[in-house]
Amino acid sequence: MRIGFFIEPQGIILKKIKSWKQLVKKNLKNQRYLNHPPHSTIAVFDLKKRIKINLLKSIFKDFSQNSFNLKIDNFSIFYQDPITNGDTLHLKIKKNINLSQLQKKILKNFRKLDVHLKKDKKFSIKKFQKNLDTFGYPFVGKEWLPHFTIASIKSNSKKKKTIFKDFLSQNISNKTFKIIFISVWLIRGDNHKRLFKIYLK
C-alpha cells in the first residue's frame, strides 16, 4: 500500500502543467509521470500492510497549520533523476519556512500510526538513504526540493532537445498561489485516487 501527501497546483500554475503534459505526450508519446495528476509531493510512504482510511484520517483530524503562499521559482530539469534515470521536467517551488514546517508535521503525524514501512530501496547518496531509514521517505529537510513535475523523459528523439529548450525558456517566476489544503492519495503504480483533504487554517 502506497500513501502520498500532495500539494495540488491552482490557477495559472495548474494550466501550465496540464498544457506541458499534453505537449510532451503529443511529441514524445507516453513518458513517466505524464499520466499522474498535477501535484507536488510532500512525502510518499510504502506500507507493508494495508491500513484503514478512517484510521489515517483520525491521525490528521486535528492537524494545525496556517495557510500560506507558495511561489514558483521557474522551469527546470532534474537531469539523470535518481528515481527514474530520466530527465525530469518540473516547475521549481521556492522553499520557505512554512513549507519546511508542513513537511515536518506530516512526517511527525504519520509516525503516530502503528505501521511498518517498506525501506527496501537503496540509494547511493547517503543522505537519501539515511532519510529513508529514519522517516520512510528519502527527500526530507535539505534533501527535499519541492516541485511540480511535468514528466520524466527517456527518449533520444530529436524533438526532445527542442522541447527542453522551449521548456527552459519559459518564465513563470514569482507566480504565487495560496495553499489552503493538502491532499492524501492512494497510489497503485500510475493510478492515483484522492482519499481526503487536510485543510489548513
Image (cartoon, grey):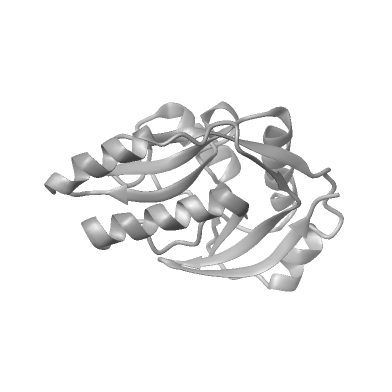
- In this orientation, does residue 80 appear? no
Residue at the image point whose x is 60% and y is 31% from the top: 174
The spot of residue 150 in percent (x, y) is: 41, 50
**Is 57 situated above or below 152?**
below
Residue at the image point whose x is 80% and y is 51% from the top: 200
Report the front residue among 140 and 155: 155
Report the front residue among 100 and 75: 75
Using the rendered view, name the quadrant where residue 117 is placed: bottom right
> Is 165 on the left-hand or right-hand side of 182?
left
The spot of residue 136 in percent (x, y) is: 56, 46
The spot of residue 95 in percent (x, y) is: 62, 30
The spot of residue 164 in percent (x, y) is: 28, 39
Residue at the image point whose x is 39% and y is 52% from the top: 20
> Is 170 on the left-hand or right-hand side of 200?
left
Residue at the image point whose x is 78% and y is 59% from the top: 59
Give the total number of marks visible in the rendering: 0
- In this orientation, does residue 17 appear? yes
> Is 145 on the left-hand or right-hand side of 189?
right
**Is 35 situated above or below 6?**
below
> Is 12 on the left-hand or right-hand side of 168?
right
Report the front residue among 191 and 10: 10
